Image: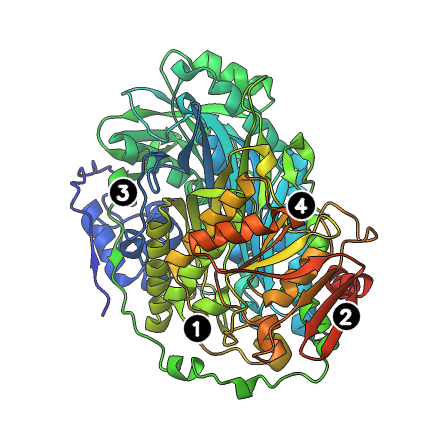
Amino acid sequence: MPTSKSSTKKTPAPKATTNASGNPAMPEAVIAKHGLTAEEYEHVVKILGRHPNITELGIFSVMWSEHCSYKNSRPELRNFPTTGPTVLVKAGDENAGVIDIGDGWAVAFKIESHNHPSAVEPFQGAATGVGGILRDIFTMGARPVFNLNSLRFGEIRGDSPAAKHNRRLFSGVVSGIAHYGNCIGVPTIGGEVQFDPSYEGNPLVNAFSLGILRHDQIRLGKASGLGNPVFYVGARTGRDGLAGAAFASRDLTEDSKADRPAVQVGDPFMEKLLLEACLELFKHPEAVVGVQDMGAAGLTCSTCETASRGGTGIEIDLQYVPQREANMTPYEIMLSESQERMLIIVRKGFEAEVKAIFEKWDLPVAEIGKVTDDGIMRVKFHGITVAEISAASLTDEAPIYYRESKMPEHQAELNRFDLGMTPEPSDYKKTLLDLISAPSLASKRWVYRQYDHMVRLGAAVPPGSDAAVFRVVTEEGAKPKFLAATVDCTARYCLLDPRRGGEIAVAEAARNLAVTGALPIGVTDNLNFGNPHNPAIFWQLKESVQGISHACRFFDVPVTGGNVSLYNQSPAGAVDPTPTIGMVGVIEDEKHITTADFKNEGDQIVLLGGFGWEMAGTIYAQEIHGVKRGFAPLLDLGREKHLHHTVVELIKKGWVRSAHDVSEGGLGLALAESCLGSPSKSPSQPGLGAIVDLPWDQRLDITLFNETQSRIILSVSSESLGAVLAECDAAGVPAQRIGVVGGKDLVLHYREQTLSWPLPELETAWGESLDRIMA
């Protein structure tokens, strides 16, 4: 049976008040509705020395939810490597991690989920997910410069009610992301979208944002300084998003539509004003002691977290909180998750300056309380105390569960695979076209053309390449810095082998950076899993974390923070384990930026890592043969890391014209994508064909569609070919010339066969697939 333990940190005894000391015991139904167990409620009573009132119960409910406390996952998260010479703010300390990028500059980045809200109200759920992650970034003192996203949906093909519903979710989520990002003026420059029946009824919406700042601009979320005033700034509080953190910490059911009030409503124009006002305020560090956004758990979380981090107390009076709805109760004000709000701890004596800045930006601003020295979060309403709780008990004394972990009974059967399950196709031309038109593999142009990726003029590579690349101009006249970023996870591998799947997620993210010309500097993760009370689900979580931790240590890349999203399951079952990896790297020089598309007629095509052979667990097996089973591909982390460094060195020497990783869809998809041209080109602009010679010693479908890891295709000039092969040989990286760039067809020679696909035919299948489905 899972056990729980409390932090050993001493909690100050709350001071009893006349209106709270005689509270009756809460009915079991009320406790259960708030997501607390009977044991957790008894722990609350022990902390308070009395029964809580309804406002206090609500406060404990949201702060002890999985979404805020990580009570089921925290022991596993301790496995992540979180320190290093470039780490300025490490995971868990603040709203986002911060990594040094040299010359006194740094990046703050993070990924977070908005899965449950997006399942109930896709547009607002996704939009407010973007707004929330942006606030996490500028709360740190950084200006957000770009966004990415990682999205998962159920099957969207066909006319079934489920497919129609999934298309509605897909369309709504993409529209919500586009609306918020485009309006606030932060470009969305990359991401990934996958489709699988396991996400039926429970889409995954993971939003990533990155901001830049100088080392001396880092802001912390601490309340310190006895008597310092506490300011509320931003949008007025309403009843939207009420107890959203608790909503995100339970399974989705057929009745979840009733939770629509728990979905927040976003206003990107208000957030733009809030962003600019906060960054202006941060130019006056003498006025600011601490800052915290009101995200999950709203005013509750921002007050108790700042007090706990500062080792202080905080006292507020809710009558001063700007409100947009009449007759709001203390319970509603404290648990509302209305968007675009911040809590600022102001240094005493600077109140007028702070008010002037926010009034200049036409934003509500109110002094609602003060910092105290008793360790208590004290909430008043018109002078009457309505909640009095130790701040540390809310943040540090949430129960921690060590859940039972057990491999699923069906895992051995799930891992059973033989080639007879994937018979060789009779029509290879049709098979390749069918595969590259599958929604998970097809071009995501339908998605990213809705995003404004050109705002701020920083996108050095348009969406659609292996990794996003962004130009950062730090100061006028200074040499710009170039950041590469990607989000990756093949959930199918994690289903078949969660530990190896976690390793591959990290390795593929690093490989996507390498083919762009970058080496990684940091990772943020979003762990999307089902109900942790199920030992099989918790086994998936535990194993995935072990795999991610091992790979990050091997690549010497710190985890800077992220998000855990559990209870991702509908009545149909849990989603496939999806530990999404967001990874950031640095490209040393603009001339090293590399993309996947073939550049010149006559260039030589070089395959690094061999032709591969592993067919189990491939998307080819799932899409063409309906087989979703087997083992995840093998992974040699040493070979993988060596491959990345070799490719980056080849790029630095100027020998590489294009580079593309071979992953899902295998060599067949990688060649087709490289032929079809740069993502910056319109579909009507032709790419460049290729003539490729394939080995005779195995079935053609194995050569084309296997997903053996640690492979990359390059195109290089004829003059550089010898040097590239020699360099790879010296480095111990398998490399061979397999073809030449040229013509208007993808041509494959195999034994006595010649297979040919005109580029317009490939473009119709790959480039227009989502347009046809979503029409």
Which one is in front in this view, the residue at disc 3 or the one at disc 2?
2
Quadrant, the C terminus:
bottom right
Q: Earlier in the sequence, mark 2 or mark 1?
A: 1
The residue mark sitting in front, 4 or 3, is 4
Mark toward the start of the polypeptide (1 vs 3): 3
Instruction: Kindly identify which residue carries mark 4.
Output: 178
Q: Disc 4 to disc 3, how far (Cα)?
A: 47 Å
Mark 2–mark 1 Cα distance, whole angstroms, equals: 34 Å
| Marks 1 & 3, CB-CB < 8 Å contact | no
**Residue at 21% of width from left, 63% of height from top?**
3
> Between residues 199 and 63, which one lies in front from this camera angle?
199
- The three-letter code of the residue at mark 4 reads Ala
Q: Residue at x 41, y 38 (%)?
A: 95
- Label pair 1/4, CB-CB below 8 angstroms: no
The disc, 4 or 3, on the residue closer to the chain's N-terminal end is 3
Q: Nearer the viewer, mark 1 or mark 4?
A: 1
Q: Which mark is residue 756?
A: 2
Residue receiving disc 3: 20
Q: Amino acid at mark 1?
A: Leu
Q: Amino acid at mark 3?
A: Ala
Pinpoint residue 301: horizontal percent, then vertical percent. Answer: 38, 40
Marks 4,3: beta carbons within 8 A: no
Where is residue 587 drawn, in percent x and y? 52, 37
